[in-house]
Image: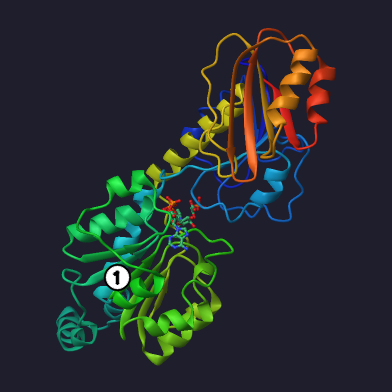
Amino acid sequence: MANATFKILTYNNISQAGLKKLPSDQFHVSSDCADPDAILLRSFDLHGVAIPPTVKAVGRAGAGVNNIPVAEYSDLGIPVFNAPGANSNAVAELAIGGMLLAARNICAGWDFARGLEGDDESIHHQVEKGKKRFVGFELAGKTLGVLGLGAIGVKVANAAAALGMKVVGFDPSMTVEAAWQLSSSAARAASVDDLVSRADILTLHIPLNNHTRDTINAARLALMKKGATLLNFSRAGVVNEADVCAALESGHLHTYICDFPSNALAGQPRAIALPHIGASTEEAEENCSVMVAEQVRDFLENGNIRHSVNFPDVILPRGESVRLGIANRNVPNMVGQITVALAEANLNIIDLLNKSRGDYAYTLIDLESPVPAETLERIRAIEGVLSARVT
Ligand SMILES: NC(=O)C1=CN([C@@H]2O[C@H](COP(=O)(O)OP(=O)(O)OC[C@H]3O[C@@H](n4cnc5c(N)ncnc54)[C@H](O)[C@@H]3O)[C@@H](O)[C@H]2O)C=CC1
Ligand SMILES: O=C(O)C(=O)COP(=O)(O)O
């Protein structure tokens, strides 16, 4: 439906590179719109925000979707798209930077140097006298534990291996794609506990969800080597912050570097909390916005689903045909009931693709002739159909 006009509601600053993929003659993009066809956002928290009945898609210009009530959108048949891997280089580079901050006491050293007063000779004297407080350690030869070997974790692992670190990883659901990318020098831990106990530096690259909340808690911190370093560029909630603070206070944990400031961390001299800038590079912002804008556009115009977190990838090349896209529960006889409704309306199917993912499924059907309104309503009324749309 190439000439339709769609309204896009944006939360957060979405890079122009992506917005350019939504030409103004077809897309009205605005941060203030009551009846949007799609929502584009970054870290804005959508929990508790009423879902406008007009919304057909959500695009997260980034990786993590814990700020989106995905289950609610799934039950309405609304795909939530993200941009897998599009900001992974930015986060990986910052994680390596975080390791260096910790290993060489860079922040404390810089604070000390900036606070020096007197003439240059006096500053020089104070530097040479004071620098022993900032003796660090080298990364080469140390063991880096990587929890979560997805787009970011694999890049961190490979960069660390190139710096001469021993790398151990754990990810029970690693993809084949990620496994192909991972340095063959990386070793495999048997469990989270095993990983945690082997690491001199532990870095977390897992999503935040009900399974991963508080992954690093008092019990796991106790398994870590005394004086180890913890890096968290994932989400605040994958660690139990009170337990981390206690481990810093006891000296068991040497440094905690993260992207998630809080009052508790502000009181910890060996915690370094950056202002959630993992993905804040021009390159990452462009990559994410372009990827997600293209995916949302293809869904609105052609019903294709690529890189949704709640529905399967379902893509058919677009010809001149009428296209019907149906999101439904993954239960028996959905395609049967849908095709009966089409047959009874005397509609001839040219192509059909149905795929499922967990509790949900999506069906794309190309037809020879337009779908009458009553047929579309009949399909929408089938129990288990969550949304149906002609594009
Ligand atoms: N600080 C920042 O600005 C950013 C933070 N992130 C965070 O990093 C997370 C990871 O991002 P990507 O690597 O791009 O995602 P990804 O989906 O490519 O990788 C995540 C990996 O974690 C694994 N995993 C899930 N649960 C696990 C568990 N319990 N134990 C071990 N592994 C587990 C998955 O199998 C997957 O391979 C995001 O979900 C987001 O929360 C992502 C981008 C920017
Ligand atoms: O992509 C992610 O998961 C991030 O955390 C990046 O967040 P942001 O888009 O910079 O608000």
Quarter containing the C terminus: top right
Q: Does 292 sit above or below residue 94?
A: above
Residue type indicated by callout 1: Leu
Q: Nearer the viewer, residue 8 or 225?
A: 225
Q: Relative to 82, is 373 on the left or the right?
A: right
Q: Does 177 sit above or below residue 184?
A: above
Residue 305 x %, y %: 56, 32
Quarter containing the N terminus: top right
The residue shown at (18%, 73%) is: 138
Quarter assignment of residue 357: top right
Quarter assignment of residue 232: bottom left
Kindly tell me whether residue 269 is visible in this rendering: no
Residue 66 x %, y %: 58, 56
Q: Does 25 sit above or below residue 189?
A: above
Residue 62 x %, y %: 49, 47
Give the structural element (helix, strand or loop) at label 1: helix
Q: Relative to 145, is 291 on the left or the right?
A: right
Disc 1: which residue: 101
Beta carbon of the mark 1 residue lies under 8 A of ligand 1: no
Q: Nearer the viewer, residue 362 or 17?
A: 362
The residue shown at (52%, 37%) is: 292
Q: Relative to 386, is 234 on the left or the right?
A: left
Judging from the image, the colouring scheme is rainbow
Quarter assignment of residue 126: bottom left
Residue 255 x %, y %: 35, 79
Q: Relative to 139, is 190 on the left or the right?
A: right
- How many other residues sit within 10 Å of disc 1, few (<14), some (14-19) or many (≥20)? some
The residue shown at (40%, 85%) is: 222
The residue shown at (31%, 49%) is: 179
Kindly tell me whether residue 333 is visible in this rendering: yes
